[in-house]
Amino acid sequence: MRKVRGLICLWVLPLLFVVGCERVKRGEVAVQPAEVVKVPKPRVKPKKAEQPQAEVAQQPTVPEAAAPETAAPETAAPQPTAPEATQLATTQPTPTQPTPQPTTPQPAPKPEVTQPPAPTAAEVAAVNFADEARSVRASADTLHSQFDRLPVGEIRSRLLLLNQAVSELEVRSPALVLWRTALRLEVTSKAPYPDVASARAWIARARAILTEQKVGLTALANAEAALKTGDWKGAAAALRDAANRLKASEQAEALTQARVCLLNAMEALERQKSSVAKAEVGEAVKALDRLIASLP
């Protein structure tokens, strides 16, 4: 029996040991969370943490006294912003005011131009045409004096310009305008059925030229009145008389001679006869002198 008991003990004890170990293991797993829970219980560190917290709380008390000091200038900073806005508001309407001011003094000098008295209509017309004739004469005289020093191409171009200027004098001469209109009326009156519309067109054309110079307008009005009654001879006579008073025949001869002399000078220049061309330019200057002398 003792042997049996001994065997049983030998078998039972290891089993109990094994079972006990398993229980112990289970007890360890169960004990571990208990140990984790027990760890915060002996915490003495939070007491130490409380002390620095109190110290930290004491430290910000000092800057809190400095904080209101900085807050004082911050309240003063927004104060100047209000007057700056008012200053900008006051400066904005100022540039709009000077803009209408310079516009008002501009029309002031305009009446000053009307102060000098103007000459009569006949004097203005005579002076204008006379100035044109004198300018053409001065150009011809300059060409004659510089003829030997200028190249052939320059002489040719100046001769062409002088010829064109003489043609313009023929067109703008008040005496010649009246004289040509009288000739046209005489030719139209010789037709079996004179055309009154064409005669009035010639008179209107002459008026367009003479209105600028304000000369011969009375003669044109008399010619129109004569045409209304069918008096062609009276209309032509009114224009011719006005042209003769302005020395139309003398002006026509002077301008014709000046044109011929210029054409001869161009022809002599083409033939390489510079001396002959220069002499012809001198004759053109003399013809223009006679034209200027015939002006009223």
Image: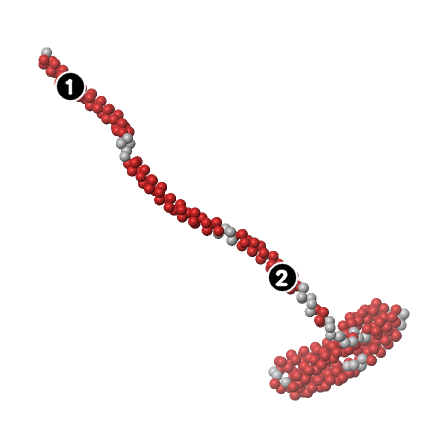
Return the residue nearer the eye: 234 or 122: 122
> Is residue 254 shown left or right of residue 25?
right
Q: Residue at left 37%, top 46%?
A: 62
Q: From the image, which quarter does the N terminus lie in?
A: top left
- Image spot of residue 243 (x, y percent): 82, 78
Q: Residue at left 38%, top 44%?
A: 61
- Image spot of residue 245 (x, y percent): 82, 80
Return the residue nearer the eye: 115 or 2: 115
Helix or strand or loop: what does disc 2 sit on?
loop
Which quadrant of the structure image shows residue 279? bottom right
> Is residue 167 shown left or right of residue 238?
left
Helix or strand or loop: what does disc 1 sit on?
helix
Which quadrant of the structure image shows residue 46? top left
Disc 2 packing (10 Å; few <14; some 14–19; many ≥20): few
Name the residue carrying label 2: 98
Residue type (three-letter) at the residue carrying disc 1:
Leu
For the residues labelled 2 and 1, say whether their Cβ atoms are less than 8 Å apart. no
Q: How is the image coloured?
A: secondary structure
Residue type (three-letter) at the residue carrying disc 2:
Pro
Return the residue nearer the eye: 131 or 3: 3
- Image spot of residue 21 (x, y percent): 20, 23
Q: Residue at left 73%, top 83%?
A: 288
Q: Is residue 188 visible?
A: no
Task: Please identify the residue farthest to the top as the structure is shown.
Answer: 1
Q: Residue at left 77%, top 81%?
A: 295
Q: CA distance from mark 2 to mark 1?
A: 121 Å
Q: From the image, which quarter does the C terminus lie in?
A: bottom right
Q: Of the numbered discs in the image, which one, if any, rests on residue 199?
A: none
Mark 2 or mark 1: whose residue is earlier in sequence: 1
Q: Is residue 4 above or below residue 199?
A: above
Q: Is residue 211 above or below residue 2?
A: below
Name the residue carrying label 1: 13
